[in-house]
Image (tube, rainbow, N blue to C red):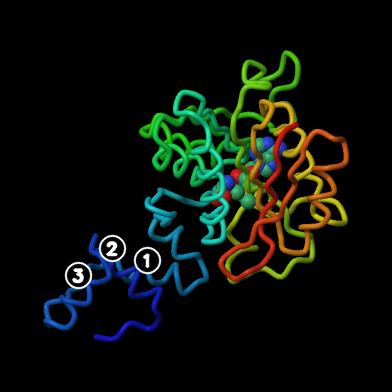
């Protein structure tokens, strides 16, 4: 038996609850039988639906998360950004490792912080109900507090999470940042929520600027913001972080392809 594409092979493994290695062992041993549910799932894949929505699972760093329509599918480049947030949180003493993930989606960054940083206390914020439900399913078993709010209101005086203002050691974020005419990969425009994709404004930075403001309110002195962006936005993000004098040590981090991928800035 041959699979039409690598995604068909991954789908078969997911449907059977096997690793790719186990699937291949069965295939080469001649004992591979696919259930009827595979045909139905393969049709969804062939219609253009992303593999992660069809299987309901997405890998992220050491974890596999539940993901479905309504939540952004975690991307490999965000694994590097989460890694920078993890390193920043590990720099704090174990009893001061309070982190907030803004725009958590299905919760990958919050989940990575909670599982890879001993003693971490993590709060995840999301505005979209559908994504928030998936975040709860993924994150609450890990002890992460999930809050459904608009980041614009977070830690404003008397607003949601006002109790966290000025107390947080690390803010991690992957906000919507795409420009409205950005070239999208297969299935993205058709299946993923636009509010998770497009940053708004001529430069795609309306949402990232809102997230930057929330980070400034949440972070304690020397607290660190790690926020993903498009490679074309690095200079503008550094300028936005530096302009009000609220952040210093403003730097750009690279992804695995050597492209400018995230802002790292320290709260004054
Ligand atoms: C690019 S997705 C990233 C999701 C997740 N952090 C990840 O990396 O997979 C951006 C997320 O931010 C959420 N979001 C956008 N604007 C928001 C706002 N003003 N307040 C709260 N969440 C927001 C979207 O609903 C979406 O889940």
Q: Secondary structure at mark 1?
A: helix
Above or below, 221 against 29 in this view is above
Above or below, 129 against 176 in this view is above
Measure the alpha-carbon separation of dots 1 and 3.
20 Å
Q: Is residue 266 left or right of residue 66?
A: right
Q: Are marks 1 and 3 in contact (CB under 8 Å)?
A: no
**Residue under numbered circle 2:** 15
Q: Are marks 2 and 1 in contact (CB under 8 Å)?
A: yes
Above or below, 246 against 190 in this view is above
Q: Which mark is residue 22?
A: 3
The quarter of the picture showing ligand 1: top right
**Residue under numbered circle 1:** 41
Give x and y (percent) for residue 28: 16, 83
Extreme residue in the top direction: 158
Q: Are marks 2 and 3 in contact (CB under 8 Å)?
A: no
Q: Residue placed at 77% from the left, 64% from the top?
A: 232
Q: Earlier in the sequence, mark 2 or mark 3?
A: 2
Q: Which quadrant of the figure has residue 265?
A: top right
Labels 1, 3: front one: 3
Q: Earlier in the sequence, mark 2 or mark 1?
A: 2
Measure the alpha-carbon separation of dots 2 and 1.
8 Å
Q: Nearer the viewer, residue 177 or 122?
A: 122
Q: Residue placed at 45% from the left, 41% from the top?
A: 111
Q: Residue placed at 66% from the left, 40% from the top?
A: 225
Q: Which quadrant of the figure has residue 143?
A: top left
Q: Secondary structure at mark 3?
A: helix
């Amino acid at each position: 038996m041959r699979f039409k594409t690598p995604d068909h092979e991954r789908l078969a493994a997911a449907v059977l609850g096997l690793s790719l290695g186990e699937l291949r062992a069965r295939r080469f041993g001649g004992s591979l039988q696919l259930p009827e549910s595979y045909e139905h799932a393969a049709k969804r894949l062939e219609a253009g639906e992303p593999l992660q929505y069809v299987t309901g699972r997405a890998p992220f760093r050491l974890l596999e998360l539940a993901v479905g329509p309504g939540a952004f599918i975690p991307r490999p480049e965000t694994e590097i950004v989460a890694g920078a947030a993890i390193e920043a949180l590990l720099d704090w003493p174990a009893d001061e490792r309070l982190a907030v993930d803004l725009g958590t989606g299905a919760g990958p960054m919050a989940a990575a912080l909670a599982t890879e940083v001993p003693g971490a206390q993590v709060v995840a914020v999301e505005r979209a109900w559908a994504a928030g439900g998936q975040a709860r399913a993924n994150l609450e078993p890990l002890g992460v507090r999930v809050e459904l709010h608009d980041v614009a209101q977070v830690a404003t005086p008397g607003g949601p999470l006002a109790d966290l203002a000025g107390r947080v050691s690390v803010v991690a974020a992957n906000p919507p940042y795409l420009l409205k005419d950005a070239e999208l990969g297969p299935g993205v425009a058709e299946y993923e929520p636009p509010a998770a994709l497009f940053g708004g404004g001529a430069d795609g930075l309306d949402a990232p600027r809102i997230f930057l403001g929330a980070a400034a309110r949440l972070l304690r002195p020397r607290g660190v913001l790690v926020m993903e962006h498009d490679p074309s936005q690095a200079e503008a993000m550094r300028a936005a972080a530096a302009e009000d004098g609220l952040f210093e040590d403003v730097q750009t981090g690279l992804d695995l392809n050597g492209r400018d991928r995230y802002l790292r800035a320290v709260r004054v």
